[in-house]
C-alpha cells in the first residue's frame, strides 16, 4: 500500500483538507432588541387591555430597569393582576409589520441573536410568530396562584454583557435597539443603530444613525457586514 507524504500546507487547511478560515473576514453577529423593534411593547399593550395607564411606562422612559420593574410589579399587585392576564394579552400581539420578513432575510445573511429584557414566560408565543429566532432574556418568579413576585436577570446589564462576551469569543457585533437599555450594546458594537426610537433618545445621541423602516435598517446592516 502506497503512502503519501503529508504536505505541511495541508495542515493549515484544517480537518479533511478544508480551507483555512479567511483571517481578513470578520465574523459578524447581529444583536437586536425585541420590544419596540420587532414586536409592540408588551407593557403598553397590557396597559391598554387592563385600562391602567401607569403601565405604559417602558425603558424608553425609565433607564433604571430594576426601578421600572419594581414599579410595574407594585401596580400589578395593587390591581390583583398576574401572569395569566398578561399572557392573555400577549397571545393577541403580532410582530410589527415587516418584522418577520426583515428577520428572515437577515438570518440568511448572518447570525442573529435577540437580546431582550423581557421574560421567558412572555416571549414564547412571540418567538413562534417570528420563526423561532435565538432569544436571550430573563425569567419571572411566579407564585402558585399566578402572582408575579419578582424576576431574575441573566446577568447585570445583560445586553452589554452579552455583546462583550460575544466579542471575547471572536465575533464582531452589530446592534440595534430603541431604548435607553440598548445604548450600551449599540455603542460597544462595531456598528450600532437606533430603530423606531423616541425623539428624546435620538436627540441625546445625535451621533447614532437612526431609522424607522425595516428596509432602511437592513440596508444599514448589510453595509457593515464583513
Image: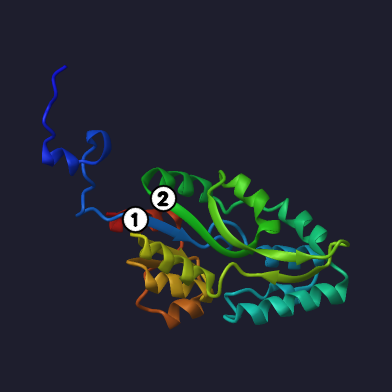
Please report whichever mark, 2 or 1, sits nearer to the chain's N-terminal start: 1
Estimate the spatial distance between the alpha carbons at disc 2 and disc 1, rounded to whole Å: 7 Å
Crowding near the residue tagged with mark 1, few <14, some 14–19, many ≥20 C-alpha atoms within 10 Å? many
Q: Quadrant location of residue 210?
A: bottom left
Task: Using the image, determine if residue 9 lies above or below residue 115.
Answer: above
Dot 2 falls on a residue whose secondary structure is strand
The residue at which mark 1 appears reads as: 28
Q: Are marks 2 and 1 in contact (CB under 8 Å)?
A: yes
Q: Quadrant of the N terminus?
A: top left
Q: Residue at x 73, y 73 (%)?
A: 55
Helix, strand or loop for disc 1:
strand
Would you say 156 lies left or right of 163 here? right
Q: In the image shown, does 98 or 170 lie closer to the viewer?
A: 170
* Point 43% across, 66% down: residue: 165
x then y, percent, for residue 37: 53, 61
Seen in the picture, residue 85 relative to 78 is either above or below; the reply is above
Q: 10 or 204, which is in the foreground?
A: 10
Q: Is residue 58 left or right of residue 49?
A: left
Residue at 29 percent of width and 56 percent of height: 223
Q: Residues within 10 Å of mark 2 (few under 14, many from 20)?
A: some
Q: Foreground residue, 95 or 70?
A: 70
Question: In terms of depth relative to the viewer, which is nearer, 167 or 179?
Answer: 167
Query: What residue lies at 38% left-to-right and 79% top-to-bottom?
Result: 206
The total number of labels drawn is 2
* Image quadrant in which the C terminus is located: bottom left
Q: Which residue is mark 2?
A: 111
Q: Is residue 57 above or below residue 10?
A: below
Residue farthest to the top, as pictured: 1
Amino acid at each position: 500500500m502506497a503512502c503519501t507524504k503529508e504536505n505541511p500546507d495541508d495542515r493549515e487547511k484544517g480537518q479533511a483538507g478544508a480551507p483555512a478560515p479567511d483571517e481578513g473576514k470578520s465574523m459578524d453577529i447581529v444583536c437586536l432588541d425585541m420590544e419596540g423593534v420587532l414586536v409592540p411593547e408588551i407593557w403598553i399593550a397590557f396597559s391598554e387591555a387592563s385600562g391602567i395607564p401607569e403601565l405604559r411606562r417602558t425603558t424608553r422612559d425609565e433607564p433604571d430597569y430594576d426601578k421600572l420593574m419594581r414599579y410595574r410589579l407594585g401596580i400589578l399587585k395593587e390591581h390583583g393582576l398576574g401572569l395569566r392576564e398578561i399572557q392573555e394579552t400577549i397571545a393577541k400581539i403580532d410582530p410589527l409589520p415587516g418584522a418577520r420578513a426583515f428577520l428572515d432575510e437577515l438570518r440568511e445573511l448572518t447570525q442573529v441573536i435577540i437580546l431582550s429584557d423581557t421574560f421567558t414566560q412572555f416571549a414564547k408565543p412571540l418567538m413562534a410568530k417570528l420563526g423561532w429566532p435565538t432569544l436571550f432574556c430573563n425569567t419571572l418568579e411566579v407564585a402558585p396562584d399566578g402572582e408575579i413576585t419578582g424576576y431574575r436577570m441573566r446577568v447585570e446589564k445583560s445586553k452589554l454583557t452579552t455583546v462583550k462576551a460575544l466579542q471575547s469569543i471572536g465575533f464582531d457585533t452589530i446592534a440595534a435597539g430603541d431604548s435607553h437599555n440598548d445604548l450600551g450594546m449599540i455603542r460597544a458594537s462595531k456598528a450600532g443603530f437606533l430603530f423606531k426610537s423616541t425623539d428624546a433618545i435620538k436627540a441625546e445621541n445625535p451621533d447614532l444613525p437612526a431609522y424607522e423602516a425595516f428596509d432602511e435598517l437592513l440596508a444599514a446592516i448589510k453595509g457593515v457586514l464583513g
